[in-house]
């Protein structure tokens, strides 16, 4: 990982060191505008552009990317953009050397062979932390897959806060709140350990101290600290993974178009309360660590006295950065309850330290909408 302002120039250094024959450059349209005139000076070899226009990666999109990669004879992938673009590059890199049914790999019926290409990521948002994880999200209709393999970790991650300067207030809020939720969820995750919780602590502290400034009146320091916090959150979930709030977010995004980070934040306070309520009965987080201790320490990191204050602080934070804490009233949700519940991600839900029932999920959804 190469972190700091102006570090984008290290891209040329890495490419000169690795000497790829040809580069596939993945990027969005708006996030790439400020680099379009100078990127040629940083890539000392032939390259082809692929503009990513979708907000999530479908099987069809992956197949198009793989065909483009093959036709260009590239041996290096550079991803400049948010989490979707970074994930897209990661998926192209590994599926380009693993042929056959995408579903077989997505459902772990087949194991991946390690990729043999060069993968470089340059995140332009402070939120997904995808540059620090061995996961990538892939969708097939309403079904969401979390592709996992050590080979998905990029060879180089260049985190230059200057690449986030052009983010709008809403983009800053949505990506930043995602990093905060990742920090919180990875802290109480069943798979958390001392290392992941240290990353979580750093992520939560950095985001809480800087997100409002970054959204309302951004400055150099707030952008830098949000980039750092996002990366720490990525390192935390790379070990511990996310839990119930992320599990619940996927149908909210797919069914109602709520951007991912916003969708996660809609329920993080509710699951915080849910886990705290059960923690009073001293439920265990794994074989050694009592959940009560975990939640107590989490409250300290959040700088609150108890779980109710934590939920209130999260709700107030959403308001301060311009995020609604309920789903839009313009949509009719009465007939959507079963679709939402059926598409909650079971893998992430089962990583929650406290069991979440269908009744719990139904009540949480109903609390977000007006019937």
Image (cartoon, rainbow, N blue to C red):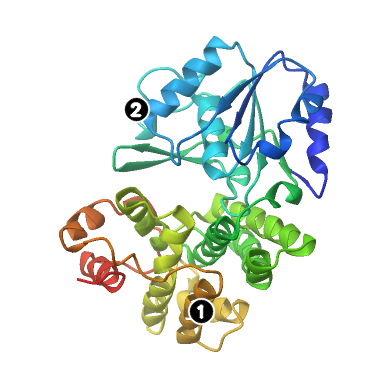
Quadrant of the image occupied by residue 114:
top right
Q: Can residue 232 be seen in this snapshot?
A: yes
Residue located at (42% from left, 28% from top): 61
Residue 155 spot, x, y in % from top left: 68, 33
Q: Earlier in the sequence, mark 1 or mark 2?
A: 2
Q: Is residue 334 above or below residue 92?
A: below
34 lies left or right of 106? right
Indicate whether 342 appears above or below 213: above
Q: Which of the image's four quarters has the N terminus? A: top right
Could you tell me which secondary element the residue under label 1 belongs to?
helix
Residue that numbered label 2 is attached to: 104
Label annotation for residue 20: none
Image quadrant in which the C terminus is located: bottom left
Residue at 38%, 18% (x, y): give it.
100
Q: In this picture, is 371 found above or below 165?
A: below
Q: Residue furthest bottom?
A: 305
The answer to whether residue 286 shows anywhere in this view is no
**What residue is disc 1 on?**
316
Disc 2: CA contacts within 10 A as few (<14), some (14-19) or many (>=20): few
Q: Residue at x 72, y 15 (%)?
A: 46
User: What is the x, y in percent for residue 342?
Assistant: 22, 53
Viewer-side label of 1, 2 = 1
């Amino acid at each position: 990982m190469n972190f700091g302002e102006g570090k984008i120039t290290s891209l040329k250094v890495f490419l000169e060191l690795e000497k790829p024959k040809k580069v596939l450059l993945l990027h969005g349209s708006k996030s790439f505008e400020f680099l379009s005139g100078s990127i040629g000076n940083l890539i000392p070899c032939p390259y082809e552009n692929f503009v990513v226009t979708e907000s999530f990666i479908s099987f069809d999109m992956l197949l198009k990317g793989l065909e483009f990669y093959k036709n260009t004879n590239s041996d290096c992938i550079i991803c400049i953009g948010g989490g979707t673009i970074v994930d897209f590059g990661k998926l192209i890199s590994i599926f380009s050397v693993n042929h056959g049914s995408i579903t077989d790999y997505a459902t772990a019926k087949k194991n991946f062979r390690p990729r043999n290409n060069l993968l470089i990521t340059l995140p332009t948002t402070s939120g997904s932390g995808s540059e620090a994880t061995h996961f990538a999200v892939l969708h097939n209709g309403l079904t969401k897959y979390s592709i996992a393999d050590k080979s998905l970790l990029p060879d180089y991650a260049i985190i230059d806060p200057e690449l986030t300067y052009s983010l709008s207030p809403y983009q800053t809020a949505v990506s930043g709140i995602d990093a905060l939720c990742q920090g919180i969820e990875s802290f109480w995750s069943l798979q958390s350990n001392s290392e992941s919780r240290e990353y979580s602590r750093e992520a939560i502290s950095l985001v809480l101290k800087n997100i409002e400034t970054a959204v309302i009146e951004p400055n150099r320091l707030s952008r830098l600290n949000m980039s750092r916090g996002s990366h720490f959150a990525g390192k935390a979930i790379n070990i511990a993974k996310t839990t119930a709030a992320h599990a619940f977010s996927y149908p909210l995004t797919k069914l109602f178009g709520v951007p991912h980070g916003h969708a996660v934040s809609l329920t993080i306070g509710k699951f915080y309360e849910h886990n705290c309520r059960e923690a009073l009965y001293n439920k265990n987080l794994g074989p050694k660590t009592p959940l009560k201790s975990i939640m107590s320490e989490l409250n300290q990191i959040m700088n609150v006295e108890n779980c109710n204050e934590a939920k209130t602080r999260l709700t107030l934070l959403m308001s301060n950065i311009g995020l609604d804490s309920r789903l839009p009233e313009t949509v009719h949700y009465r007939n959507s309850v079963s679709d939402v519940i059926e598409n909650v991600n079971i893998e992430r839900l089962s990583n929650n330290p406290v069991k979440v029932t269908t009744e719990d999920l139904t009540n949480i959804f109903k609390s977000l909408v007006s019937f």
